[in-house]
Structure formats: structure tokens, C-alpha cells
């Protein structure tokens, strides 16, 4: 029995208590007038129990405990504690301004503190000396530590302190509080009562640590939930897809850019290589073209010469023909036929003349003289005439000459005039001719152009490019499709393989598990069988043998059938008194039989063995399952990347395909457009040239007409002049002919005169001759005839030249007229043929030239394209993009061959780069938008802040993987498992709280019963406690969660917590419960849910007719006395509850003290009652009041008095130990 | 007409000219966004606010109020718009991807200013809106403005990390709708 047995004051209580020793080994009563220090004493005792200077009921305005109780350094309050084995002391004193403790392992001895002179030691050193070898502890200034030592909360305490424990409890805190409450008559708080009861229940405090939930388990519950919800409900998937697609596009573009750079390198190289070749080709073509145009010129020249020659010949012939017709006319006018006839008669006439002249000679020869005379006369006349004629003839000649001269002059004059006219019109004609020439040249040129155009292929390169691109795109599409198909097939085969292996593993595992299960079943059967055996053993032969026959297993056991006999019931075995050990009259040596009978223990062992084997099997099944899961996981890890790879290929292919298709369509349209354009342009150009040609032809015709007009006008003028000339000549001729006529007439006249005279002469001659006899008649006839012949001959003579001329003309011209005509026709034909031939040749050359020109143009185009390429590239090298792709440009190979030129490639590069930039910005935006949905510490550990390009890319890559591998499911699963686990955990923890509730109810009902049984206060009709449902919202929630968990133990967690199937409602409920819990935890700020939160404790006290009803706090019950009483009772009850529980656990019993001040307020009966009430529960009461009425009820009664020096003296008045005894306290 | 329980909260925010953005760190805001995002709620609230001459507008991930304007207000509005344009110009110069969901710290911007003259010039030009001289002050002031108009929020007060809200798209949209005719374009000095 441990208890506080004594308290000693040295120099305490504000110097007024020099020394006092008070025994506390029973109920103690302090009496004395007001202010002598009763309460001081009580407080000092209380301090022993609670070691809390604040909770001693010292008013604030008074000196505090330290100052009041320990005014000197050598002020001490010593508490002596009685234990079963002896006593120890607790010394309290002031150290560093506050009360501190030491424990001394010895009973109290005055000499430890007080010297022989009755004076307290000045310092501790002396006490230490005085203590000698007695064990004492260091100063304990921490009250908590003190209480831990005193109440035996040994955890963390050095061993040396253990022996100073009053009790051994970890949950002692309510003891000092209860004691203080009794002393201070504090209001009764259900909470406190609850605490006390709960702490009495168990040393270990049952509680749910909310901080673990709010800080760890459920910390990110909502964010996590929201994060997952964003995936399952929101459009975050789209955003993620946007990120991945943009990233794919970007990656594709980057690749494309690289390819383009390679291609650019190839193309550039190509250009550099081909450029000089093409240049050479151009040169050759130009040379060829020049040659052709020279040939053309030559041809023209040759033709022109030929044409000139032929035309000249035609001119000659036509001239001749003209001459012929002119001469014909002339001769016709001259009646050339008659002349010819007459001239033809000349020989005849000559002969006739000769004949006649001879005849006349003959006839006249006789009359010669006459003849001669007359002849002379005639001659004379003739001479006269001749002379005259000569004169006139000369005159005529002069006239003629003059005329000729005039004519000549005129001709000259007109020639000059004509020349002038010609000169005048020459320029005009020249211009006109030049125009014609120009036009015809222009026509030729245009014809060249036309053939050029005809041979030129418009948009050839573009169309060709389109075609190659189309083929490329087509092949790209096919390739992509093939690849995709391949990838699909691969995925399928991988999946098949996967499934196959999975199936294998599963089947294998199942097989193994089946085998194990079979084994397990067998073992189970065996166990059951053994159970049955054991169960039966009591009533069977086996049991009987065990009970009645010693060593039966060595004898009968060896020969008995185990199944049918040994464990068979109802065999009613009996010991037959025959002591012979025989078996139905047979004796065998059983030691030879090698058989052992299993005892019950054996069986049990066997059963244990089986059980452990079953456990082993279970374990191995679990192992198998885990192993299979591991293997499945391995398979997943093995196959998933492969599938992912293929999927990526598919994605890429699809992208390429889509891209290519769009491009293909685009190209097709472009190609058609180009073709249409080419046709249209060619047609337009041809039309244009045709139009130009026709226009030029028209113009040429016009120019020719102009030339003709000019020529005609020249001819006209010349013609006019000619006519004028001719008129002039005519008039002159007329004048001349008149003159000549006159002259002729004069000649005629003269002739006539002469003739008359001749006639006269002739007549005279005739006469004379006649007279002389001459045949004059005949002579006359002859003469006449001769005359006629002579005139005819003179005519012939005059016309002889003409005839000769005619004959010449005839020979030369008239006979050849047809020839000339033929020749003209021939020549004209020849001219035509030549012209045709020339045209043909010319056309050929023109075509050739056109071809060459077209070729040159084409080559020039290529050249300029090359040049353009080079310039573009040169410019490109100055851009930033070039720097990023330079390395690729110079590391191309044959793979990168392309039909596209540098220009296109560069522009495509630029476009691609722009698109990359655009896509990159898009990617950034998409990623930012995506991550904007998440907080920094999101469930998926998504990075939310990016600065570098690579960070964006890495994120996109990661996200792609995340989406592809559907990691959200894993996260979901994880979160689900975690929260299912939390729910289970809550369920479990709440369960343990609830379990405790039952115990508490039991205690409370005990208390209630106790009240009823031991109520000694008449006024108190009833005093009751009860538990009520907890008002703590968190606890309520926890209970709800627990109930939910109980209802759905197997439903939550494993299936999809966020799925929307039939499970949804339950899951939602779980989530909403957790959410509420989080909310409540945040608002309540409670750190933990203890048992006391799990129920409410209510009081109900009926005092006379005052019913308090069920209340949580009890401040005043009836009058003051009743109030004190009731509270004291409840507190003592509580102390008792605690004490009982505590003492159950430890061997040593212990006692506690309760202090009641001003006990005089109670009626003596009640005072007695409460003393009994307390003492029944092994609790001692220390009361104080001015007077004592029943000193016998107390073990000790002390009276406190002050002397004249205001020094308090404590004197024992009575001490009941059989008989009352008064001891005077030694005065210090 | 059933209006949601959060109507008064929604009104309190939107009537201040602020936005309710979907990616706000503030749980109440994101809750309000979810309320508004419900089609039925939106329709009801639209009708409800229309009665008091507020037009509830829905953007791409944000909600706001608009009101019929008269001329004088419009001019003020244009002044405000100028300021926003300058702000956006500045932040977009800092990072082209400065848009909804973007995260940044003022110190990053200040560090960049030391190496980026253009950015510095643009920040200097914000003086006229902020009335501050010191770079940091200008930036802080601008950010305060962005925060008070709920385009940006302080996500992490320890690291001073800000997050751009979806409402920022409103500003981007504002700029995109500015139509500069070609003849006027030529008159704008580069």
C-alpha cells in the first residue's frame, strides 16, 4: 500500500510556518480560525499531487506559490511517502526562482534539514552531508518529469527514478486534475469525466490521427481526384491529343526539314554540275540556229538571184513579143504583102527592061544622031530636073535632119524629165518597197515564231515536276499504306504472341494452382478426418483404451484395425477380469508387429502438419499468382514498347499518307491547271502570231499595192510625157511633112514641067523620026513600058531594105513568136516552181530555226532557273534557317535525289521552317494550356513550367507515352487502391474506437449502479450518467465511412472507382464521404479523433424536484453544499474508476488523497457520508473547517493557531488509533 | 427559373469586371467555373443576369460579363485596350508562348530584360501606364493589374510563380479583332 503519509513544512508559507509536521496516513481534519493557514496546508498537499503552481486555486492578486511557500533558500516542503517496503521522501524547494523537487530514498529525518540548534541548514550542502550515504536524486525542476516519476510513467525515465513511483500508469493525468477539481470545487465537465473514464480504460490511448490523413493520406485527395477527373470527364484528353498530334506534326516537320535540306544539297550539287553543260548546249544550239538563219538568208539570196534572172528573161521575152506585135502592126500598115509581091517581080521586070531596052536600041540605032540630039535635050532636061530635085532633096534632107534633131532633142528632154520623175518617186517607191520587204521579213519572223511556239512545250518543267511529284506522292502513299499495313500486321502478330504467351502463363499458373488446390483439398479432407477421429476418440474404443489400458498401444493397439475398430463408437469395451493378456484366447507377441498406433497428440501433430502444409500451399498459390503477375507484367513490358513502336509507325504513316494525299490532290489539280494553261497559252500565242501574220500579210499586200500604185503613177506620168512628146513630134512631123509635101509638090511641078518639055521633045523626036521613018510607035510603046518598069523598079529599089528588114524581122521575130510565148510561159512556170521550192525550203529552215529557238529558250529557261537557284541559295545562306540545316546540306547522298529545284526546295524549307515555328508555338500553347489544368504538385508529376525547347519536347514525348500506354488507368488504379485502402483504414480505426464504446458504457452503467446503491444524500433523488451519440462531425463521418466500408468491403477499390457502371453510385458515395471528411478536417482543425470524440457524456441529477435534465456541464446543483457534495462524489467516483483499473494491473495497492476545504458547509451526516464514500474507495480525505464536530471520523485532527509573532503552529488535536491522543507539536 | 446556389459568388466576381477561368488555382473559382460550365446553369444564369442588364459571356475556358456601352464609356474602353495591348506586347516579347497556362516568375523576366534590349524598351514603354521608374516596380505594377483583372494569378507565393489564366485569351482575342485596313497599315510607322 503506497500513499503519501506525511508532509513537513520548513520555513514555509510566507515565513509564517517555521516548522510543521503533519501525518496524512488517514482522513485528516484541519481546524482553526480564518486565515491561520488551513488552505495553505491543503494547497501544499495538492501540489504534491499535481505539481502545477497554476492550478492550486491561488488568486492572481496573491503571492504565487513559489514566493509564498518558499520565501527562503532553505524553505522546504517535504512529503514522505509510505510504500510496502519502506518510505521515501519528496523534497520541494525553490530552485532558480521556482519550486523544484528531489527524491530521497529514506524516511523523513529532521536532522537532514535542521541542525542541533533547531535551525534549518543554510544550504543544500549540509543536507547532503547529513544525508550521508542515503540515495537522493538530482534536482527535478520539470514538473512533467516529476509527475512522470511520481505516477510511474516510466517511459524514457532513468531507472533510478522508478522506485519513487506512487502508482504505475501512463494515463495518470486525470488523477491530479480530479484531485484538484475536488479541492477547487470546479464545475463538472462531461468532457473531463469522459477523459477520465477513457484513460482508465487503457494505458494506450486509442485515437485516429487526423493529421496522418489530412497531411499524408488525404492530402492531395481532391487534387488527385480532380486530376483524374480531368482525364475522365473533361476535355483534357483532347488537349493531350492536341499536344501529341502537334508534337507528331512537329517531329514530322523536323524530319521533313532535314530531308529537304538533304535534297537541297543534292539539288544544289545537281545544279552546279549541270549548269556548265546546259550553257554549252545553249551555245551549240545558238550556233546551230545561227547557221540555220544564215542558210535561210542564203536561200533567200539565191532565190532572189534566180528570180531576178528569170524575171529578166521574162522581161526580154515579153519585150520581144511586144516588139513583134509593134512591128506586125507597122508592117501591116505598110501592106508589106503587096510590097513583097512587087519586089518579087523584080527579076521579071529586069529581064523585060533589058529586052525592051535592046529592042529600042535596035529600033533607034539608025536614028542615033537624032536620037542623040534629042537625047541631049532630054538629058539636059533631066539634068535640070535632077538638079532641082537635088536642091529640093537637100532641102528635104535639111528638114528631115532638123526633124530628127528635134526629135532627138525632145527625146533627150523627155528622158531627163522621166529621170526626174523617177528620181522624184524613187524615194517613195523605195520606202514602199522597203515596207513590203519589212512586212515580208516580219511575216517570216512570225512564221519562225509560230513554229517555235508550235514546238515549244508550255509549262513543261512545271508539268513534269507535277508528274514526278505525283508519282512521288503516290509512292509515298503506297509506301505509307504498306508500312501501316505491315505495322498493323506486326501489332496483330505481337498481340497474338503476347496473348499466346499470356495464355500460356495463365494456363500454366492455373494448372499449378489447380494441382495445389487439389492437394489442399486432400489435406483438408485429412484434417477433417483427423478432426472426426479426435472428436470420436472420446466415445470410441480409442478413448476408452487411453483411459483404461496403460500401454495399450504396445499390445492391443498393434493388432487392432484403426478405421473399423479403434475409432468406432458404441463398441462398449469392458475390461474382463481375466488377467491373462490374451486376445480372444490367442496370445501373440505383439512386439514383433511393426506397427505404431497414433495417439491423439500424434493426430494433432499430423493435423498441424497438414495445416502448415495447407498454409504452405496457400503461400505457394499466392507466390504463383504473384509470379504469374510478374511474368505478365514482364510480358507487358516486353510487348508494349514493341506495339508502341509500331503504333508510332502507324501514326507517322497516317500523317504522311494524309499529307501526301492532300498534296497529291493539290498536285493533280495543279497539273491539270498547268496543262490547261499550257494549251491555252499555246493556242493564244499561236492565234496571236497567226493574227499578226495575217495582219502582216494584209499590210504586205497593202504595201505591194502601194508600190504598184506608185509604179502606175510613175508610168502614167511617163506615159503622159510620152504622149506629150509624141504630140509634139507629130505636130513637128506634120509641119515637116507639109514642108516636104511642098517640096515634093515643087519637085512634082518641076517634074511635070520637065516631063512636058520631055514630052514635047519626045514628040518632036518622034516627029522627026517619024518623018525620017522610024517606028516611033513601037519606040513609044517600049518607052512607056520602060517607064512603067523603071518606076516599078525604083519602087522596088526603095522598098528593098524594108523587105530585107522585114525578112530579117520575120526570120528573127515573127517566126519565133510562138517560141517566145512558150518561153514566157515556161519562165513564169519556172518562177512559180522556184518560188514554191524556195518557200518549201524556207519553211523547212523556218521550222528548224523555230525548233532551235524553242530549244534555246528552253535551255535558257533552265539556265535562268539554275541561275535563279544559285542566287536563291546564295540568299538562303544568309538566313538563320540555313545555319540550322547547313550540316545536312553538305551531307546528302544518292538517297536524297529529287526532281525539285533549289528554289522550290528553299521555299519549301522556308515554309516548313515557318510551319515548324508555328507548330512549335502551337505546341507551346497546347502544352501550356494542358498543364494549366494541373497544379504544380499534380498527381501525375507533370511538369508545369517550361523554358527550354527540349523541355517542351520532352514533355510532349512523355505525354505521348502517357497517353499511348494509357497510364491514366494505372494512376486511377493506384489512386483507387490508395483511397480504398484509406477507407479500409478508417473503417478499421473507427471500428477500434467503437469497440471501446462498449467498455465505456459498461463502466458508466457501473457508476450509475454505484450511485444508486451508495447514495447517502437524501436530497439527491437520482444521479445518472449516460453516453450519447457523438456530436463530432468528423467522428460521424468516420462512422459513416466505416459503415460504408463494412457494406462494401469487397466492392471498393478493386473495381474502377471512377467508372460509370453500376459501381458508380457507391464510388461516388465513397468519394463524397472522403471529400466531406477532408472538408471537415480542414474546418475543425482537430488534430486527432480520440475515444472521447466518439461519444458524448451527459449528466442528469435530480435534486429534490430540480431536474437538471441531460446536460454536458454541471455548474450548480442545488445549494452550495449539495453542489460540493455531488461534485465531490462524482470526482471520487472517477478517481475510483481510475484507481480500480490501475490497481488491477499492478500488484501494489495505493491510496490517494482528496482535499475538501470549508467542509463545514456540509451537514455532519453528509460529512460522515462523504468520508465513508471516499474511504470505501480507498481514498483519504483531508478536510478543513473552522470547527470539528465529529473528530472521531478522522484519523488526525490538527488545529492551526497563530502566535503573537504571526507564526502558524500546527498542533495535532486528536489522533484516532483506538483512542484519541493529543500530541504537542514541537515548536521550531 | 432555378439559379445555382453560387449565383451571388459568381455575380460578385464577374460584376467587378473579373473573369472566371477554368484553370484557376483557386478552388472556389474553379468550382464556379464548373457551375457555369453546366449548360443548364449557364442558360439560366444568362437569363437571370440579362434582367439586370449584364450579359453573361462564355469564352474558351472563361466567363465574363459584358454590358451595352455608350460612346463615352467606349472611349475609356479604348484607352484601357491600348494599355492591354502594350502589356500583351511586352509579355509576348518575353515569350511568344505567353498564353493560357503559361507559368513564369517576375525574376525570370527581370533577368531577361538585362539581355534583351527590345524587352527592356517595351518595359520602359509601360512606364506611362504604371507611373513607376524602376523595372521591378513597373513589372510588379503591371502584374498587379493583370492579377486584379484576373488574367493572371499568383500560383506559388513562395517561389513567386505566376500562372496565366484562360481569361488571357480574351485579351488575345481582343487584339486579333483589331482590323487594320491596308491604307492605314502603311501609315503606321515601323
Image (spheres, grey):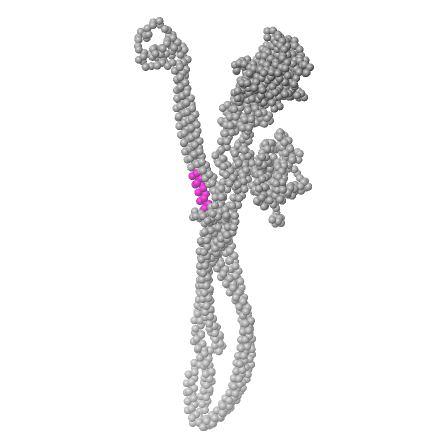
Residue A262 placement, left or right of A140: left
Q: Is residue A1084 visible?
A: yes
Depth check: give the residue in front, A946 or A793.
A946
Name the image quarter holding residue B152. top right
- Which quadrant would the N terminus of chain B be assigned to in this image? top right
Residue depicted at 53% across the width and 36% down the height: A943
Extreme-top residue of the structure: A577
Return the x and y of residue A624 as percentages of the image width and height: 42, 26
Residue depicted at 42% across the width and 26% down the height: A623
Task: Tell me if residue A732 comes above or below residue A631 in the rendering.
Answer: below
Return the x and y of residue A720 as percentages of the image width and height: 55, 73
- The stretch in magenta equals A470-487
Q: Is residue A1109 visible?
A: no
Return the x and y of residue A339 as percentages of the image width and height: 46, 79
Magenta segment's dominant SS is helix
Task: Tell me if residue A689 comes above or below residue A1142 in the rendering.
Answer: below
Return the x and y of residue A863 as percentages of the image width and height: 48, 55
Whether A542 is among the magenta residues is no
Depth check: give the residue in front, A921 or A1223.
A1223
Task: Tell me if residue A844 comes above or below residue A1008 in the rendering.
Answer: below
Depth check: give the residue in front, A824 or A673.
A673
Amino acid at each position: 500500500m503506497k500513499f503519501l503519509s506525511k508532509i513537513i513544512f520548513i520555513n514555509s508559507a510566507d515565513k509564517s510556518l517555521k516548522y510543521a509536521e503533519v501525518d496524512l496516513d488517514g482522513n485528516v481534519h484541519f481546524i482553526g480560525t480564518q486565515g491561520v493557514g488551513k488552505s495553505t496546508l491543503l494547497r501544499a498537499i495538492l501540489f504534491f499531487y499535481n505539481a502545477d503552481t497554476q492550478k492550486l486555486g491561488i488568486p492572481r492578486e496573491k503571492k504565487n506559490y513559489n514566493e509564498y511557500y518558499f520565501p527562503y533558500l532553505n524553505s522546504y516542503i517535504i512529503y514522505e511517502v509510505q510504500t510496502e517496503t519502506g518510505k521515501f521522501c519528496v523534497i520541494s524547494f525553490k530552485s532558480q526562482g521556482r519550486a523544484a523537487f528531489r527524491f530521497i530514498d529514506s524516511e523523513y529525518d529532521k536532522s537532514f534539514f535542521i541542525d542541533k540548534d533547531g535551525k534549518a541548514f543554510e544550504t543544500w550542502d549540509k543536507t547532503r552531508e547529513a544525508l550521508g550515504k542515503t540515495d537522493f536524486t538530482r534536482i527535478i525542476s520539470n514538473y512533467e518529469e516529476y509527475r512522470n516519476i511520481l505516477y510511474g510513467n516510466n517511459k524514457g525515465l532513468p531507472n533510478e527514478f522508478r522506485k519513487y513511483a506512487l502508482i504505475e500508469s501512463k494515463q495518470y493525468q486525470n488523477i491530479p486534475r480530479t484531485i484538484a477539481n475536488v479541492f477547487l470545487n470546479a464545475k463538472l465537465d462531461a468532457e473531463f469525466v469522459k477523459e477520465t473514464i477513457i484513460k482508465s480504460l487503457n494505458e494506450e490511448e486509442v485515437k485516429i490521427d487526423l493529421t496522418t490523413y489530412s497531411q499524408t493520406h488525404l492530402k492531395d485527395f481532391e487534387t488527385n481526384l480532380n486530376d483524374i477527373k480531368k482525364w475522365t470527364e473533361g476535355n483534357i484528353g483532347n488537349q493531350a491529343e492536341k499536344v501529341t498530334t502537334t508534337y507528331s506534326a512537329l517531329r514530322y516537320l523536323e524530319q521533313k526539314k532535314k530531308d529537304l535540306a538533304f535534297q537541297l544539297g543534292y539539288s544544289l550539287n545537281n545544279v552546279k554540275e549541270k549548269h556548265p553543260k546546259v550553257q554549252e548546249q545553249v551555245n551549240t544550239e545558238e550556233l546551230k540556229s545561227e547557221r540555220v538563219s544564215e542558210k535561210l538568208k542564203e536561200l533567200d539570196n539565191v532565190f532572189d538571184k534566180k528570180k531576178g534572172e528569170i524575171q529578166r528573161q521574162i522581161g526580154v521575152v515579153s519585150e520581144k513579143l511586144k516588139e513583134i506585135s509593134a512591128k506586125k502592126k507597122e508592117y501591116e500598115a505598110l501592106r508589106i504583102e503587096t510590097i513583097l509581091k512587087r519586089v518579087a517581080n523584080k527579076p521579071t521586070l529586069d529581064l523585060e527592061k533589058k529586052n525592051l531596052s535592046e529592042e529600042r536600041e535596035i529600033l533607034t540605032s539608025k536614028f542615033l544622031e537624032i536620037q542623040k540630039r534629042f537625047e541631049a535635050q532630054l538629058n539636059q532636061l533631066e539634068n535640070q530636073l535632077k538638079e532641082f530635085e537635088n536642091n529640093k532633096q537637100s532641102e528635104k534632107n535639111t528638114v528631115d535632119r532638123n526633124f530628127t534633131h528635134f526629135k532627138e532633142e525632145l527625146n533627150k528632154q523627155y528622158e531627163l524629165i522621166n529621170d526626174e520623175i523617177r528620181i522624184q518617186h524613187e524615194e517613195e517607191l523605195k520606202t514602199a518597197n522597203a515596207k513590203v520587204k519589212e512586212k515580208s521579213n516580219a511575216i517570216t519572223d512570225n512564221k519562225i515564231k509560230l513554229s517555235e511556239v508550235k514546238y515549244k512545250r508550255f509549262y513543261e518543267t512545271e508539268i513534269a515536276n507535277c508528274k514526278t511529284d505525283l508519282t512521288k506522292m503516290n509512292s509515298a502513299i503506297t509506301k505509307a499504306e504498306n508500312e501501316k499495313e505491315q505495322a498493323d500486321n506486326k501489332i496483330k502478330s505481337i498481340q497474338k504472341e503476347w496473348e499466346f504467351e499470356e495464355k500460356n502463363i495463365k494456363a500454366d499458373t492455373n494448372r499449378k494452382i489447380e494441382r495445389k488446390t487439389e492437394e489442399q483439398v486432400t489435406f483438408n479432407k485429412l484434417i477433417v478426418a483427423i478432426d472426426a477421429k479426435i472428436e470420436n476418440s472420446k466415445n470410441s474404443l480409442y478413448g476408452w483404451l487411453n483411459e483404461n489400458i496403460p500401454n495399450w498401444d504396445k499390445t492391443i493397439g498393434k493388432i487392432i484395425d484403426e478405421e473399423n475398430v479403434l475409432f468406432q463408437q458404441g463398441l462398449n469395451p469392458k475390461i474382463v477380469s481375466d488377467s491373462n493378456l490374451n486376445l480372444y484366447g490367442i496370445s501373440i507377441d505383439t512386439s514383433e508387429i511393426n506397427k505404431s498406433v497414433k495417439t491423439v497428440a500424434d493426430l494433432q501433430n499430423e493435423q498441424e502438419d497438414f495445416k502448415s502444409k495447407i498454409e504452405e500451399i496457400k503461400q505457394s498459390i499466392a507466390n504463383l499468382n504473384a509470379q504469374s503477375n510478374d511474368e505478365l507484367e514482364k510480358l507487358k513490358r516486353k510487348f508494349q514498347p514493341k506495339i508502341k513502336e509500331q503504333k508510332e509507325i502507324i501514326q507517322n504513316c497516317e500523317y504522311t499518307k494524309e499529307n501526301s494525299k492532300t498534296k497529291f490532290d493539290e498536285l493533280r489539280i495543279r497539273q491539270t491547271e498547268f496543262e490547261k494553261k499550257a494549251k491555252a497559252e499555246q493556242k493564244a500565242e499561236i492565234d496571236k502570231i497567226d493574227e499578226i501574220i495575217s495582219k502582216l500579210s494584209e499590210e504586205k499586200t497593202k504595201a505591194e499595192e502601194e508600190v504598184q500604185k506608185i509604179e502606175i503613177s510613175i508610168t502614167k506620168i511617163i506615159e503622159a510625157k510620152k504622149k506629150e512628146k509624141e504630140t509634139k513630134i507629130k505636130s513637128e512631123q506634120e509641119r515637116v511633112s507639109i514642108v516636104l509635101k511642098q517640096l515634093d509638090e515643087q519637085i512634082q511641078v518641076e517634074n511635070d514641067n520637065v516631063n512636058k518639055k520631055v514630052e514635047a521633045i519626045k514628040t518632036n523626036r518622034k516627029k522627026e523620026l517619024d518623018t525620017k521613018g522610024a517606028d516611033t510607035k513601037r519606040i513609044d510603046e517600049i518607052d512607056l513600058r520602060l517607064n512603067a518598069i523603071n518606076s516599078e523598079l525604083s519602087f522596088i529599089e526603095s522598098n528593098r531594105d524594108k523587105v530585107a528588114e522585114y525578112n530579117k524581122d520575120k526570120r528573127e521575130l515573127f517566126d519565133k513568136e510562138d517560141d517566145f510565148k512558150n518561153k514566157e510561159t515556161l519562165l513564169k512556170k519556172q518562177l512559180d516552181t522556184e518560188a514554191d521550192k524556195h518557200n518549201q525550203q524556207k519553211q523547212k529552215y523556218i521550222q528548224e530555226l523555230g525548233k532551235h529557238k524553242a530549244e534555246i529558250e528552253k535551255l535558257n529557261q533552265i539556265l535562268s532557273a539554275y541561275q535563279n537557284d544559285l542566287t536563291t541559295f546564295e540568299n538562303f545562306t544568309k538566313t538563320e534557317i540555313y545555319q540550322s540545316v547547313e550540316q545536312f546540306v553538305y551531307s546528302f547522298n544518292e538517297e536524297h535525289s529529287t526532281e525539285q529545284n533549289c528554289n522550290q526546295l528553299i521555299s519549301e524549307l522556308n515554309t516548313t521552317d515557318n510551319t515548324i515555328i508555328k507548330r512549335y508555338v502551337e505546341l507551346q500553347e497546347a502544352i501550356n494550356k494542358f498543364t494549366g489544368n494541373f497544379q504544380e504538385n499534380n498527381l501525375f508529376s507533370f511538369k508545369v513550367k517550361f523554358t527550354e525547347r527540349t523541355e517542351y519536347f520532352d514533355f510532349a514525348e512523355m505525354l505521348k507515352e502517357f497517353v499511348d500506354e494509357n497510364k491514366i488507368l494505372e494512376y486511377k488504379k493506384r489512386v483507387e487502391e490508395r483511397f480504398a485502402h484509406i477507407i479500409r483504414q478508417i473503417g478499421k480505426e473507427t471500428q477500434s474506437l467503437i469497440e471501446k464504446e462498449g467498455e465505456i458504457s459498461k463502466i458508466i452503467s457501473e457508476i450509475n449502479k454505484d450511485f444508486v446503491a451508495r447514495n447517502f444524500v437524501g436530497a439527491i433523488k437520482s444521479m445518472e450518467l449516460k453516453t450519447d451519440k457523438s456530436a463530432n462531425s468528423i467522428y460521424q463521418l468516420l462512422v459513416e465511412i466505416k459503415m460504408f466500408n463494412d457494406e462494401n468491403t469487397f466492392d471498393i477499390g478493386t473495381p474502377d472507382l471512377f467508372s460509370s457502371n453500376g459501381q458508380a453510385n457507391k464510388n461516388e458515395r465513397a468519394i463524397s464521404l472522403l471529400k466531406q471528411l477532408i472538408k471537415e478536417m480542414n474546418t475543425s482543425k482537430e488534430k486527432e479523433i480520440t475515444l472521447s470524440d466518439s461519444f458524448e457524456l451527459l449528466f442528469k441529477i435530480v435534486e429534490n424536484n430540480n431536474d437538471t435534465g441531460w446536460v454536458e456541464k454541471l455548474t450548480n446543483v442545488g445549494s452550495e453544499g449539495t453542489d460540493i457534495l455531488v461534485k465531490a462524489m462524482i470526482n471520487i467516483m472517477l478517481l475510483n474508476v481510475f484507481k480500480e483499473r490501475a490497481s488491477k494491473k499492478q500488484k501494489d495497492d495505493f491510496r490517494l488523497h482528496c482535499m475538501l476545504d470549508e467542509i463545514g458547509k456540509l451537514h455532519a451526516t453528509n460529512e460522515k457520508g462523504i468520508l465513508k464514500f471516499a474511504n470505501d474507495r480507498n481514498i483519504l480525505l483531508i478536510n478543513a473547517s473552522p470547527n470539528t464536530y465529529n473528530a472521531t471520523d478522522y484519523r488526525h485532527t490538527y488545529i492551526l493557531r497563530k502566535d503573537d509573532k504571526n507564526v502558524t503552529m500546527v498542533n495535532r488535536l486528536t489522533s484516532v488509533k483506538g483512542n484519541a491522543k493529543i500530541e504537542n507539536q514541537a515548536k521550531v | 427559373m432555378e439559379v445555382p446556389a453560387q449565383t451571388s459568388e459568381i455575380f460578385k466576381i464577374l460584376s467587378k469586371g473579373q473573369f472566371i477561368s477554368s484553370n484557376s488555382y483557386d478552388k472556389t473559382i474553379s468550382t464556379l467555373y464548373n457551375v457555369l460550365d453546366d449548360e443548364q446553369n449557364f442558360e439560366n444564369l444568362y437569363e437571370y443576369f440579362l434582367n439586370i442588364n449584364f450579359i453573361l459571356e462564355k469564352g474558351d475556358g472563361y466567363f465574363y460579363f459584358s454590358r451595352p456601352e455608350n460612346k463615352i464609356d467606349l472611349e475609356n474602353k479604348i484607352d484601357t485596350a491600348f494599355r492591354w495591348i502594350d502589356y500583351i506586347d511586352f509579355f509576348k516579347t518575353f515569350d511568344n508562348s505567353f498564353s493560357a497556362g503559361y507559368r513564369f516568375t517576375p525574376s525570370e523576366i527581370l533577368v531577361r530584360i538585362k539581355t534583351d534590349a527590345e524587352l527592356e524598351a517595351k518595359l520602359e514603354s509601360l512606364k506611362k501606364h504604371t507611373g513607376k521608374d524602376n523595372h521591378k516596380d513597373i513589372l510588379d505594377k503591371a502584374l498587379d493589374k493583370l492579377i486584379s483583372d484576373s488574367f493572371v494569378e499568383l500560383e506559388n507565393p513562395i517561389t513567386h510563380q505566376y500562372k496565366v489564366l484562360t481569361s488571357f485569351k480574351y485579351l488575345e482575342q481582343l487584339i486579333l479583332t483589331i482590323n487594320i485596313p491596308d491604307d492605314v497599315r502603311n501609315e503606321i510607322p515601323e
